[in-house]
Amino acid sequence: MGEWGELAQVLRVYWSLLLGNVVEWYEFTIYGYQAIYLEKNFFQGSDVGVWLGFSITFLARPLGGVFLGSIGDKFGRSVAVNISIVGMLIGTVGQGCLPTANCGIPWLANLGLV
């Protein structure tokens, strides 16, 4: 197998990992740029709440790795990946459904931290 064949094999194996990391860091970047908007509309002017929400993601990543790693060891990678995808789907839809602090129930906007 030539150099191109080896490169194709490496890309085939690692493409999903690369894509997942790029999307994850893109999401972190967007959150950072939107921090001012999030502070005003979801955290009632609390910059600490915004950055607490940002820091929770860095804590959840290794904990999720331990949890999904043990699931993957017991039931296989396919089950672990499916649980991960469903969890991301639920989190994304849940964040999209959160009301802002201007809806009349201000504490409901902070529900996204839970």
Image (cartoon, rainbow, N blue to C red):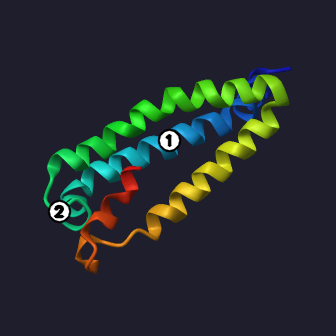
Asked which secondary structure carries label 1, the reply is helix
Q: Nearer the viewer, residue 67 or 8?
A: 67
Q: Is residue 110 above or below residue 8?
A: below
Image position, residue 51 (x, y; %) = 24, 43
What's under tag 2, amino acid-wise? Gln
Numbered circles on residues, count = 2
Residue at image x 70%, y 44%? 83
Could you tell whether 87 is left or right of 10 in the image?
A: left
Residue 88 drawn above or below residue 105? above
Q: Position of residue 8 (x, y in %)?
A: 75, 32
Which secondary structure lies at badge 2?
A: loop
Specify the amino acid type for callout 1: Val
**In front of the other: 68 or 29:** 68
Residue in the foreground of this view, choosing between 2 and 107: 107
Q: Which mark is residue 95?
A: none
The location of residue 42, given as percent across then percent down, is 26, 63
Q: Which residue is mark 2?
A: 44
Q: Residue at x 27, y 48 (%)?
A: 32
Q: Relative to residue 73, is residue 30 drawn left or right?
A: left
Q: Which residue is mark 1?
A: 22
In which quadrant will I find the N terminus? top right
Answer yes or no: do the residues labelled 1 and 2 have beta carbons within 8 Å? no
- Which residue is depicted at the point 59% across and 28% down? 65
Residue 29 % position (x, y): 34, 47
In this rendering, which labeled residue sits more in front, label 1 or label 2?
A: 2
Closer to the N terminus: mark 1 or mark 2? Answer: 1
Q: Is residue 105 left or right of residue 15?
A: left
Distance CA(mark 1)–CA(mark 2): 31 Å
Disc 2 crowd rating (10 Å Cα; few below 14, some 14-19, many 20+) is: some
Mark 1: few, some, or many residues within 10 Å (few <14, many ≥20)?
few
